[in-house]
Image (tube, rainbow, N blue to C red):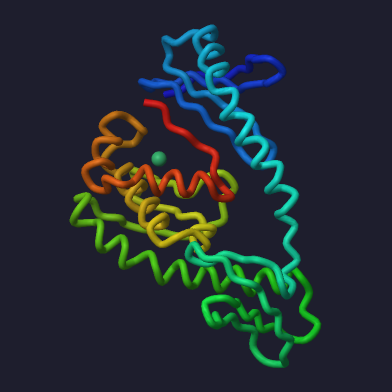
C-alpha cells in the first residue's frame, strides 16, 4: 500500500518522497537524469526524511555524476574499436561487412566480431548485437533457475528477458514470473546469478525487509559483493537501507 508522493528540497536537490507501508527508509537515484526518490515508512515525517537525505548527499552526488558520465558515453555507434562487455569482460568490437546472414562471434577472448551485410547502418548493427546478447543470456538463465529452485524452495513459472532502464530484474509474485534485464548479458556470470536469486527470494518475501536480507544471507552469503559489483556498473542506482 502506498500513498501519493510529494517533493521536498534539500539544498538545491529535489527529492520525490513516497510513503509506503515499509519498515525502513529506502533511497534510490535513477538514470538517466539522476532523479532522487526516497520511500519512507508511513510514520516517518518529512523532517526525518530531510535529515536522512542530508546524510546521504555525498552518495547521491556520486550517483548523479556517474549517470552524467554514462549519458555522455552511451552514444554507441557499433563501429570497429568500440568497447563492449560480455559476461563481465571487455571486448573490442570488430565490424565485418559480408554478404551473408549476420552473426556474432567471439575471438581470442578479446574481440567480438560483428558480421553484418554490407551497407548495414548503426541501428542494424546494434540490433544484431543485441539479439546475440539476448540469445546468450537466454541460454544462461534456465540452468541457474533450475539450480536455485530447490535451494530457495520456490518454482519460477515463467521468466523472460527485456530491456529495462532502471532495474536489473523484476518479479511478479502472483504469477511467479521473473523478468531479467538484457544488460545482465554484459555483467559477470555471478552477478546474473545474484539477480536471479534476488528475484526468486522475492517469491518468498515481496519487499526488502529484514526477512528478505536473512534469506539472501542464508542462500548466498556473499550477495553484497555482487550487488556492489553491479552498483559500480552502468545501471547502478540503488542502495538498501536496513
Ligand atoms: Zn528486490
The quarter of the rendering in which ligand 1 is drawn is: top left
Of residues 167 and 12, the one nearer the viewer is 12
Query: In the rendered view, does 153 fall on the left or right side of 9?
Result: left
Of residues 138 and 111, the one nearer the viewer is 111
Where's the N terminus, which quadrant? top left
Residue closest to the far right: 119
Query: In the rendered view, does 179 fall on the left or right side of 33?
Result: left
Where's the C terminus, which quadrant? top left
Q: Quadrant of residue 120?
A: bottom right
Tell me if residue 177 comes above or below residue 143 in the rendering. above
Query: In the rendered view, does 192 fall on the left or right side of 73?
Result: left
Q: Quadrant of residue 15?
A: top right
Q: Residue at x 59, y 80 (%)?
A: 104
Q: Position of residue 114 (x, y in %)?
A: 65, 79
Of residues 59 and 214, the one nearer the viewer is 59
Tell me if residue 30 comes above or below residue 82 in the rendering. above
Query: In the rendered view, does 210 fall on the left or right side of 78?
Result: left
Q: Residue at x 44, y 68 (%)?
A: 138
Q: Position of residue 178 (x, y in %)?
A: 39, 52
Q: Position of residue 41 (x, y in %)?
A: 42, 17
Q: Residue at x 31, y 47 (%)?
A: 222
Q: Residue at x 70, y 45 (%)?
A: 69
Tell me if residue 241 comes above or below residue 172 in the rendering. above
Tally of numbered tags: 0
Q: Position of residue 172 (x, y in %)?
A: 39, 45
Q: Quadrant of residue 10?
A: top right
Amino acid at each position: 500500500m502506498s500513498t501519493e508522493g510529494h517533493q521536498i528540497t534539500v539544498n538545491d536537490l529535489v527529492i520525490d518522497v513516497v510513503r509506503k507501508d515499509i519498515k525502513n527508509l529506502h533511497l534510490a537515484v535513477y538514470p538517466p537524469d539522476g532523479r532522487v526518490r526516497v520511500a519512507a515508512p508511513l510514520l516517518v515525517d518529512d523532517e526525518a526524511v530531510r535529515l536522512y537525505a542530508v546524510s546521504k548527499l555525498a552518495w547521491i552526488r556520486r550517483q548523479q555524476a556517474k549517470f552524467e558520465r554514462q549519458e555522455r558515453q552511451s552514444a554507441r555507434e557499433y563501429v570497429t574499436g568500440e568497447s563492449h562487455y560480455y559476461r563481465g569482460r571487455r571486448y573490442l568490437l570488430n565490424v565485418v561487412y559480408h554478404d551473408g546472414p549476420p552473426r556474432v562471434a567471439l575471438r581470442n577472448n578479446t574481440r567480438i566480431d560483428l558480421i553484418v551485410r554490407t551497407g548495414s547502418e548503426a541501428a542494424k548493427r546494434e540490433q544484431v548485437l543485441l539479439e546475440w546478447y539476448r540469445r546468450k543470456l537466454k541460454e544462461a538463465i534456465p540452468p541457474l533457475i533450475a539450480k536455485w529452485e530447490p535451494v530457495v524452495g520456490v518454482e519460477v513459472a515463467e521468466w523472460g528477458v527485456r530491456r529495462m532502464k532502471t532495474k536489473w530484474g523484476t518479479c511478479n509474485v502472483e504469477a511467479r514470473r521473473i523478468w531479467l534485464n538484457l544488460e545482465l548479458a554484459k555483467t559477470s556470470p555471478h552477478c546474473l546469478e545474484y539477480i536471479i536469486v534476488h528475484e526468486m527470494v522475492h517469491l518468498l518475501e515481496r519487499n526488502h525487509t529484514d526477512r528478505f536480507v536473512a534469506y539472501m544471507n542464508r542462500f548466498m552469503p556473499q550477495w553484497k559483493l555482487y550487488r556492489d559489483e553491479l552498483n559500480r556498473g552502468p545501471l547502478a542506482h540503488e542502495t538498501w537501507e536496513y
